[in-house]
Image (spheres, rainbow, N blue to C red):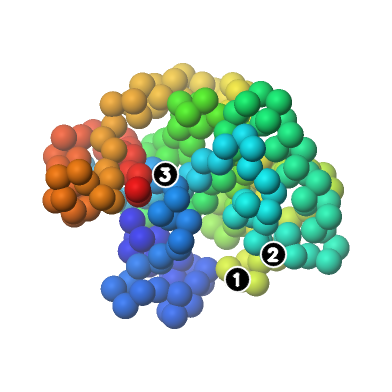
C-alpha cells in the first residue's frame, strides 16, 4: 500500500524523492493508527488505497491530524478553520459518535475511470456507517480532479468561511471537505448498502498477526480468500 501511494504521489509531484523510504514506501506515522481500505484487482494486487483514522467523540482539535495542516497555520484562515472543525466535534460529542479523518487516497492508473474507482469512493460512506460514525473530514487535493470527484459524491466544503487553499507540502491547491454519512447519496445509496454488506465479510489484514506469520503472509492469505476485486480492509495494530 505504501509503495503504491508513494509511486503515485511521487509521479504527481505531491512528494519529492526524499519523501520515500529506501524501498519506495511513503510511510507516515498516522498509518499505524488508522484503518486502510485496499482496492484489489483480480490477481490480488493492490490497485487503490484510502486511510481512515477513527477518533473517539472526546477528541480535541489539537489532537487531529488536520491541526497540523497548512490551513491550520494560515494567518488568515486558521481561526475560521478551527471554529468550523470544533463545531463538527461538538455535534459528534452530542451524538456520542466517533470523528473520522480520511486521507491517503491513491488509485492506480488501470483503475481510474472504472467502476472500481467509483466503488472506492462510495466505500468511504460504507465504512463510516459500519463503525457507527457520522462526520468525517478530508484534505482533498484539486490535482487530478480529486476534490471535484469527492464533492460530486457527497463531500462539501467544511465551511463557507474556509476556502480552498494552497498546501506547500504537497505543492497544490487543496479543499477541506466534510462528509455526513447519515445523508443518503442520491443515485448511489443502493451501492453503499451493498458495499456495507461486502465489507462486513471482507478480510482484515493485521500488521502483527497472532500466529507471527507476518504481514506478507497475512496479505497473501487474505487475497486468496477474497477473490472478488471490490475491497479489503487492513488495520495496523
Q: Is residue 11 left or right of residue 140?
A: left
Coordinates of residue 140 in the picture (x, y in percent): 60, 52
Residue at x 66% of width, y 66% of height: 167
Q: Is residue 117 left or right of residue 89?
A: left
Residue 234 seen in the current view = yes
N-terminal label among 3 and 1: 3
Residue at x 57% of width, y 37% of height: 56
Q: Secondary structure at mark 2?
A: loop
| Mark 3: few/some/many CA within 10 Å (<14, 14-19, 20+) | many
Residue at x 45% of width, y 26% of height: 130
- Total tally of numbered discs in the picture: 3
Q: Nearer the viewer, residue 172 or 88?
A: 88
Quarter-of-image position of residue 37: top left
Q: Tell me the tag on residue 65.
A: none
Where is mark 1, residue-wise?
169
- Callout 2–callout 1 Cβ contact below 8 Å: yes
Where is mark 3, residue-wise?
35
Q: Nearer the viewer, mark 3 or mark 1?
A: 3
N-terminal label among 2 and 1: 2
Where is mark 2, residue-wise?
70
Residue at x 72% of width, y 30% of height: 91
Amino acid at each position: 500500500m505504501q509503495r503504491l501511494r508513494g509511486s503515485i504521489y511521487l509521479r504527481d509531484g505531491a512528494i519529492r524523492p526524499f519523501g520515500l523510504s529506501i524501498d519506495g514506501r511513503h510511510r507516515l506515522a498516522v498509518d499505524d493508527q488508522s484503518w486502510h481500505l485496499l482496492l484489489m484487482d483480480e490477481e490480488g494486487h493492490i490497485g487503490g488505497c484510502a486511510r481512515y483514522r477513527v477518533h473517539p467523540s472526546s477528541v480535541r482539535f489539537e489532537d487531529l491530524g488536520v491541526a497540523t495542516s497548512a490551513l491550520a497555520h494560515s494567518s488568515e484562515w486558521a481561526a475560521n478553520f478551527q471554529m468550523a472543525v470544533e463545531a463538527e466535534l461538538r455535534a459528534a460529542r452530542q451524538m456520542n459518535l466517533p470523528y473520522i479523518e480520511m486521507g491517503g487516497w491513491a488509485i492506480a492508473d488501470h483503475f481510474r475511470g472504472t467502476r472500481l474507482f467509483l466503488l472506492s469512493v462510495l466505500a468511504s460512506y460504507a465504512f463510516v456507517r459500519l463503525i457507527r460514525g457520522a462526520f468525517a473530514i478530508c484534505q482533498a487535493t484539486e490535482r487530478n480532479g480529486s476534490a471535484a470527484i469527492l464533492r460530486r459524491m457527497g463531500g462539501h466544503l467544511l465551511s463557507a468561511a474556509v476556502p480552498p487553499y494552497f498546501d506547500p507540502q504537497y505543492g497544490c491547491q487543496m479543499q477541506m471537505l466534510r462528509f455526513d454519512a447519515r445523508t443518503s447519496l442520491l443515485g448511489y445509496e443502493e451501492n453503499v448498502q451493498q458495499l456495507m454488506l461486502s465489507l462486513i465479510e471482507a478480510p482484515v489484514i493485521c500488521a502483527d498477526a497472532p500466529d507471527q506469520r507476518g504481514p506478507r503472509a497475512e496479505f497473501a492469505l487474505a487475497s486468496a480468500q477474497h477473490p472478488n476485486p471490490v475491497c479489503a480492509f487492513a488495520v495496523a495494530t
